[in-house]
Amino acid sequence: GTERPTIGEGVEVVVVSNRQPYRHSWGDNGIEVDRPTGGLTAGLDTVVRRIEGSWIAWGDGDADAEAVDEHDRVSVPPDAEDGYPLRRVWLTEDQVDGYYYGFSNRVLWPICHGALTRVHSESEYWEAYEAVNERFADAVGERVGRGDVVWLQDYHFGLLPQMLRSRVPEDVLVTHFWHIPWPGWDTFRACPHGSEVLRGLLGNDLFVVHTERYRQNFLDCVEAAIPDAVVDRAAGRVFHEDGVTTVEAYPLGVDTERILELATDGDADERWRRIRSRYGIGEGVRVGVGVDRLDYTKGIPQRIDAVERLLERHPECRGTFTLVQIGSESRSRIPAYRELQTAVVEGVNRVNARFRTDDWRPIVYTTDRLSDRELYTLYRNADVGVVSPIRDGMNLVAQEYVAAQADGNGVLVLSRQAGAHDLIGEDAVSITPQDTDEFAGALHAALTMPEERRRERMGALVETCRSFDTEVWIEDVLGSVARLREEGHGG
Ligand code: ADQ
């Protein structure tokens, strides 16, 4: 493809994420490999192959996989020449409880999404978070050499950048991408150990968030919580006792080319017929699509309420519109997530019981994991993409829906609270998910929009999403890394 920024001859990039890109286990025919859901790990996998980097992640799952992975190298397909070292960090059950289900997902996740009533903190959570960040810091320390680049992912590693400073050569450049929102100071001040997390993150040479708003929020928090730091707003730089941290906003996109290809290749029409028949969607019924991890930030109950309101207010939509809601199970060890799962099932049953007929249901709900090809075919053919988070760092589903629009006439209904709205909101139908009347009105507007208007708006959306797709994001991040290295940052 296009020209890539060069980071430097012989420089290794070490990616660190909580989630591993591949999961190895013993099956009937020996070693089996599968890939966890999610656009990010797939996107980064391509990059790591291309730049001959390596990867360190939590070895979630089969303990046997440790033996499988003795040589640390992943090659999928098995004989691919561009495999790379994948090092797993194995954690005890207690560590996972405290670090992952505890501090990461019951403290930092709700804080960053402004869900203060969901925050639950225990001292064991913090202790495990510290201990696991130490474990990862040791693993990174063993891997990197002089001049290498460490590329950290997400909120599981808030302390790791600072911890790395005593473990890696001074000229190693550390960068971090934060996938979830960075909240304003008024919210972040409620974070237990918040200043320690901020100090941890200032161990980065380059800290990257999705949007300009998150970037300003982060700088506000540093200014308020870290008295010895000096913030240069114009340059987006923080000067502190251990060095300089540059803060950038680079929105993460999706692989638009690949999505379009998979949405249209082979027997795409037959695939769509099969999907319709599997979900019992009759001829002439128009389809809305929602795809989410089952998370309380995604606004799924609000979406169900809006469909109910739509059917109350617009009887002509009864029998002619169905929402297909795909929900993937997530973090079920946390009570709030189990409660959400129950609320979604109850909401779907309520609306279906109220309106369903012998051959039509208002909402088809499934927790199936779809293959990429099926998912993109569903997006392509759905008349409306419904993305309604209460708050979301970016939301890749909105972009995937747009990227799959081979026929260019779908409509995106998008929450103002998604990071994606800052980038593509202008050509979507905007909603505040808690405003049920507005939300129902938006669904109705989407279903009745004249074709010409739909094409115009979708055309603009497609173009915008292409302008910051995964390739562009990678070039932005690695381009900044290259510039900072030239300026002599790192360490
Ligand atoms: P998530 O909160 O997981 O990501 P999102 O951006 O929507 O949210 O990504 C979810 C991904 O999983 C999408 O690629 C979607 O297609 C896929 N997916 C979900 N359910 C699926 C199913 N049943 N079958 C197949 N695929 C499924 C976090 C932040 C977001 C941010 C991303 C990336 O919370 O705000 O956009 O990271 O930075």
Image (spheres, rainbow, N blue to C red):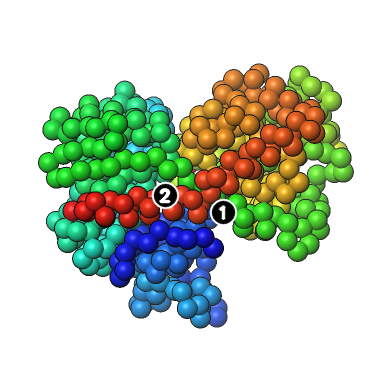
Give the number of marks. Answer: 2
Residues marked 2 and 1 touching at CB (< 8 Å)? no
Residue 336 lies in quadrant = top left
The residue at which mark 2 appears reads as: 476
Q: Residue at x 19, y 59 (%)?
A: 171
Q: Given the image, on which type of amino acid does mark 1 rest?
A: Asp
Badge 2 crowding class, 10 Å Cα cut-off, few under 14, some 14 to 19, many 20 or more, is some
Most foreground residue, 319 or 213: 213
Helix, strand, or loop for circle 2? helix
Q: Cα distance, mark 2 to mark 1?
A: 15 Å
Q: Residue at x 31, y 23 (%)?
A: 186
Residue at 80 percent of width and 46 percent of height: 280
Position of the N terminus, as image quadrant, is: bottom right
x and y percentages locating residue 155 in the rendered image: 35, 45
Residue 460, image quadrant: top right
Residue 337's x, y, as percent?
48, 40
Q: Could you say where residue 459 lies in the image, as x and y percent from the top left?
A: 68, 40
For label 1, the residue is 255
Relative vertical location of residue 94 with respect to residue 202 in this rendering, above or below: below
